[in-house]
Image (spheres, grey):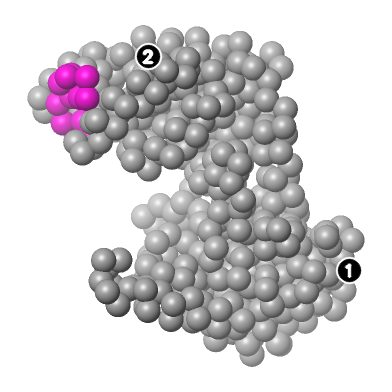
């Protein structure tokens, strides 16, 4: 397999799939540039060799429609600054042939959001899966997706996939486009190589105890991951908004807290499975509740299963933080995906901070700690502790699916698996 180190990019136009789906504030300014910084070594290698760059990425979920809120034009200046080269911009990713052909060695072009085209994800738009016409629509979309990928491939001489965060999706730019390059002209970027190596490390050499921390607002979005990890971990911490679905499932009062009422049975099933498999399932016992979803709201500490009406759980309470720390302490393998509360509000950061501090301590004591998912990465950066963990992954779903042992289409398309 060709690698980025063995390929000579001199005089070559390289189209690089990156994951620049970075968080933006209301003014359109980047609040966490981890993903951009992560791709820089790959981008700079191409330029240093005397090649030119075509950068492509998605942002958000525009669902196949142009939406200025998700335009990559908002980050062009930031990428230019980080790269040290003026980045040109193509306002339509499917109509950039002329701009790509005009690139000279050392020049850079960024394409507009790939997901402004439904063909990128390859899913029929505006038709329900139960519709009898869905299968035909899906078949037609797959053909359109191939044509879209062919167009993207036509811009360049070689293809690099450095977007681990989307490697678990068979999208036009992450997998299908690779079909239009021979084995000598497609490769993984430096970031992808590091991510794949980190996953291989944690899968082939699990040191116990293994503690996984899964956060997030909904248990439904993490069900597959949680179930699969239960066959691998010794301790499973479930935190964040999903805490209150578990509390209500056990008959608790959760006030105005977020809850998936249709997943109460699922929560009880997960608790039963953990017990059956001998996994130490750690759930919150107290929380910091607020009387409004605001940083400036009134707060009180109360049991997670006895939150007053008009109040909602916003962060892990002091007793819960101690339980989390105890489950992390002494672990030799740690995976963290998802915060313990609304960490974006400074008032509700202490639960996530307690997790970060416990992971940092365990890492100092010899544990291998892997942090993945946008919110977890933002947490660790907010607390200034990025250098105190073993590895920070740019991928959320991709990381977790890889740890489950699933084949990632974005990697397989390069390796020919």
Judge whether 357 appears above or below 90 on screen: above
Q: Quadrant of residue 243?
A: top left
Q: Which residues are magenta?
A: 248-259
C-alpha gap between disc 2 and disc 1: 54 Å
Residue 149 horizontal/vertical position (percent)? 58, 77
The location of residue 157, given as percent across then percent down, is: 77, 78
Residue lying farthest to the bottom in this orientation: 98
Q: Residue at x 34, y 36 (%)?
A: 219
**Where on the picture, by quarter, is residue 70?**
bottom left
Query: Does 319 sit left or right of 252 as displayed?
Result: right
**Magenta residues: mostly which secondary structure?**
loop
Relative to residue 116, is residue 9 drawn left or right?
Answer: right
- The residue lying at 56 percent from left, 54 percent from top is 168
Residue, x 22% and y 25% (percent of image)? Answer: 249
Q: Which residue is mark 2?
A: 320
Q: Is residue 371 above or below residue 25?
A: above
Q: Which mark is residue 8?
A: 1
Mark 2 Cα-neighbour bin, 10 Å: few <14, some 14–19, many ≥20: many
* Residue 13 pos. (x, y %): 76, 77
Given residues 348 and 146, the one toward you in this image is 146
Q: Earlier in the sequence, mark 2 or mark 1?
A: 1
């Amino acid at each position: 397999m060709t690698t980025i180190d063995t390929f000579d990019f001199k005089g070559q136009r390289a189209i690089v799939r990156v994951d620049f789906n970075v968080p933006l504030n209301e003014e359109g300014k980047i609040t966490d540039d981890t993903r951009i910084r992560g791709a820089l070594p790959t981008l700079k290698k191409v330029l240093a060799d005397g090649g030119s760059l075509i950068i492509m990425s998605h942002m958000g979920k525009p669902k196949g429609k142009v939406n200025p809120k998700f335009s990559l034009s908002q980050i062009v200046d930031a990428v230019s600054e980080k790269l040290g080269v003026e980045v040109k911009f193509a306002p339509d990713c499917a109509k950039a042939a002329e701009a790509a052909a005009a690139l000279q060695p050392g020049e850079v072009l960024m394409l507009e959001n790939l997901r402004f085209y439904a063909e990128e994800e390859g899913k029929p738009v505006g038709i329900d899966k139960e519709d009898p016409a869905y299968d035909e629509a899906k078949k037609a979309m797959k053909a359109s997706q191939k044509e879209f990928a062919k167009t993207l491939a036509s811009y360049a001489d070689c293809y690099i996939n450095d977007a681990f965060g989307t490697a678990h999706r068979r999208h036009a730019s992450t997998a299908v486009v690779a079909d239009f390059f021979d084995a000598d002209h497609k490769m993984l970027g430096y970031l992808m190589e590091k991510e794949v190596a980190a996953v291989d490390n944690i899968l082939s050499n699990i040191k116990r105890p293994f503690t996984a921390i899964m956060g997030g607002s909904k248990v439904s979005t993490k069900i597959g991951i949680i179930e699969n990890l239960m066959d691998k971990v010794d301790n499973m911490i479930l935190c964040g908004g999903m805490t209150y679905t578990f509390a209500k499932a056990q008959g608790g009062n959760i006030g105005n807290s977020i809850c998936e009422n249709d997943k109460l049975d699922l929560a009880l099933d997960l608790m039963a499975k953990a017990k059956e498999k001998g996994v130490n399932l750690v759930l919150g016992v107290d929380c910091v509740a607020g009387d409004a979803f605001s940083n400036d709201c009134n707060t009180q500490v109360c049991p997670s299963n006895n939150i007053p009406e008009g109040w909602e759980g916003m962060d892990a309470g002091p007793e819960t933080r101690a339980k989390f720390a105890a489950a992390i302490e002494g672990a030799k393998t740690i995976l963290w995906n998802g915060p313990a509360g609304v960490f974006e509000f400074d008032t509700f950061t202490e639960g996530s901070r307690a997790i970060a501090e416990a992971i940092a301590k365990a890492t100092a004591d010899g544990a291998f700690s892997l942090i993945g998912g946008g919110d977890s990465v933002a947490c660790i950066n907010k607390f200034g502790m990025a250098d105190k963990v073993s590895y920070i992954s740019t991928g959320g779903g991709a990381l977790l699916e890889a740890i489950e042992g699933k084949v990632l289409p974005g990697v397989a398309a390069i390796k020919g698996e």
